[in-house]
Image (tube, helix red, strand yellow):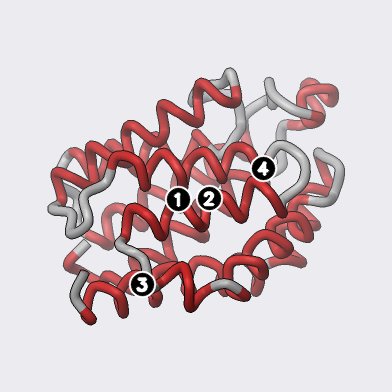
Amino acid sequence: MTEAGNTRTRRLIEAVAATIIEHTGELTELDSAIGDGDHGQNMKRGMTAILDDLDAIAAKPLPEALKAAGTQLVMKVGGASGPLYGTLFMALGKEIAPDPTRDDLTHAFAAAIEAVKVRGKSDAGQKTMLDVLVPVCEALRNGGSAREIDEAAEKARDATRDMQAQKGRASFLRERSIGHIDPGARSSQLMIAAVIDVLGEGA
């Protein structure tokens, strides 16, 4: 892996982790409305573990770096988020090329989303992180620009406000879950935004 590749991997992972940590309070507030209230702190714990091991992770080829980050999330993040985000990162690492083209990225991202669906026994439309990931994948597959992908993620995040939760603790609230943005959708959108910010219009 080239030095430029190592640097890009480091910047991507660091940006995603730092963005989630920065929004810990917001994620906690969103989850407090319809869940256990621990999404923010759980995600912060996982992302902090990634940053603590950043030198070792970023020194790996991109596929192995993603797998290592996913492993940290599985080990450090509690609740449902750890296994789901861990699965996303590890499956992405399993499928992605070391120096991916857009087509490579689209294929790997789609495969990672399918792995999350299987792990969570869920699909888009159930007020989860998938309600952001699936539209983002579609925008990527359809040739959307970085700005269009970013906008698709934001629109998808906001759309979860009007959904009734069908998974997790939020589902116990039934119609009372309507009117709140899903915390997993928000954390997914934050990660997408961080990646786009690093990659820029070349995404």
Specify whether 104 is left or right of 45. left
Please provide percent x and percent y for residue 22.
65, 74
Q: Is residue 2 positioned above or below 126 on the image?
A: below
Amino acid under disc 4: Ser
Amino acid under disc 2: Gly
Considering the numbered disc 3 on the image, is that residue within a helix, a strand or a loop? Answer: helix
Q: What residue lies at 17% left-to-right and 39% top-to-bottom?
A: 142
Amino acid under disc 3: Asp
Please provide percent x and percent y for residue 136.
35, 44
Considering the numbered disc 1 on the image, is that residue within a helix, a strand or a loop? Answer: helix
Disc on the earlier residue, 4 or 1: 1
Amino acid under disc 1: Lys
Specify whether 173 is left or right of 112. right
Q: What residue lies at 56% left-to-right and 21% top-to-bottom?
A: 122
**Tag on residue 67?**
1
| Distance between the alpha carbons at the discs numbered 4 and 1 | 16 Å
Front-most of residues 139 and 177: 139
Quadrant the C terminus occupies: bottom left
* Foreground: disc 4 or disc 2: 2
* Foreground: disc 3 or disc 2: 2
| Distance between the alpha carbons at the discs numbered 4 and 2 | 11 Å
Please provide percent x and percent y for residue 82.
66, 44
Q: Which residue is mark 4?
A: 81
Disc on the earlier residue, 4 or 2: 2
Q: Residues within 10 Å of mark 1 (few under 14, many from 20)?
A: many
Q: What residue lies at 24% left-to-right and 73% top-to-bottom?
A: 5
Q: Which residue is mark 3?
A: 197
Corner quadrant of residue 90: top left
Q: Residues within 10 Å of mark 3 (few under 14, many from 20)?
A: some
